[in-house]
Image (tube, helix red, strand yellow):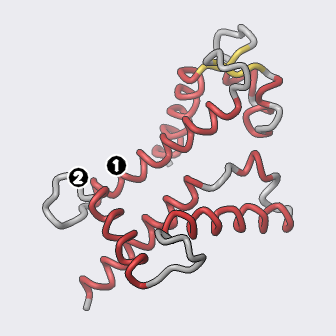
Amino acid sequence: MKKTINYLTIIFCFTLGASLAQADSPEKCGPMHDGQMHGQMHGQMEDKMLKGTDSDGDGAISKAEFDAFHAKRFKEMDANGDGRITLDEMKAAHMQMLENGKDKRFDEADANHDGALSREETEKMPRMSRRFEEIDADHDGKVTREEMDAVMEKMRSRRDKK
């Protein structure tokens, strides 16, 4: 019974994380405290979850579709294929989801596809726009992926020290 509960907890956490990573970023949906925008973000997330799980496109998720979706996610997380997901594998899968989401948001914001974000391109991303000068380490008026990664790493380091 304990193994079943642990398994279901892992799957729930992974599914929630995957759903959140695939949902549009809060910068696009507005402030989290805005009830309408918050609800809109959840609606988009739920729509993506349904579309990603509803393999026959009938607008509903059958038990077979649910099981197939989770089996696929389990296989993706079980990096060494031993039929078990360790904490390290779970952390690695979570980090991969975050990286994929970050890259997607960057690419979507890079309207002119020059590999960097101008101040104007970050206007739809309020948190980044507010910290533009801090993120733009070389002060050339553009934020590169490397500059963004460096700031993210600095934030992770501060968080890990707490």
122 horizontally vs 36: left or right: left
Nearest the viewer among 86 and 56 is 56
Residue placed under numbered mark 1 in the picture: 92
Instruction: Please identify the quarter of the rendering in which residue 101 is found.
Output: top right
The amino acid marked with disc number 2 is Ala
Nearest the viewer among 53 and 77 is 53
* Residue 58 badge: none
Q: Where is residue 146 in the image (x, y as percent from the top left)?
A: 53, 21
Q: Where is residue 116 in the image (x, y as percent from the top left)?
A: 65, 18
Disc with the residue nearer the chain's start (1 vs 2): 2
Instruction: Please identify the quarter of the rendering in which residue 147 is found.
Output: top right
Residue 145 drawn above or below residue 48 = above
Q: Which residue is found at the position 31% from the left and 78% from the top? A: 6
Nearest the viewer among 6 and 52 is 52
Q: Distance between the residues labelled 1 and 2?
A: 9 Å
Residue placed under numbered mark 2 in the picture: 79
34 horizontally vs 6: left or right: right
Which of the image's four quarters has the N terminus? Answer: bottom left
State the SS at label 1: helix
The amino acid marked with disc number 1 is Ala
Residue 81 drawn above or below residue 58 = above
Q: Which residue is found at the position 67% from the left and 51% from the top? A: 24
Q: Which residue is found at the position 66% from the left and 20% from the top? A: 113
142 horizontally vs 158: left or right: right
Residue 45 drawn above or below residue 137 = below
Q: Position of residue 149 (x, y in %)?
A: 53, 28
State the SS at label 2: loop
- Circle 2 Cα neighbour tier, 10 Å, few/some/many (<14 / 14–19 / ≥20): some
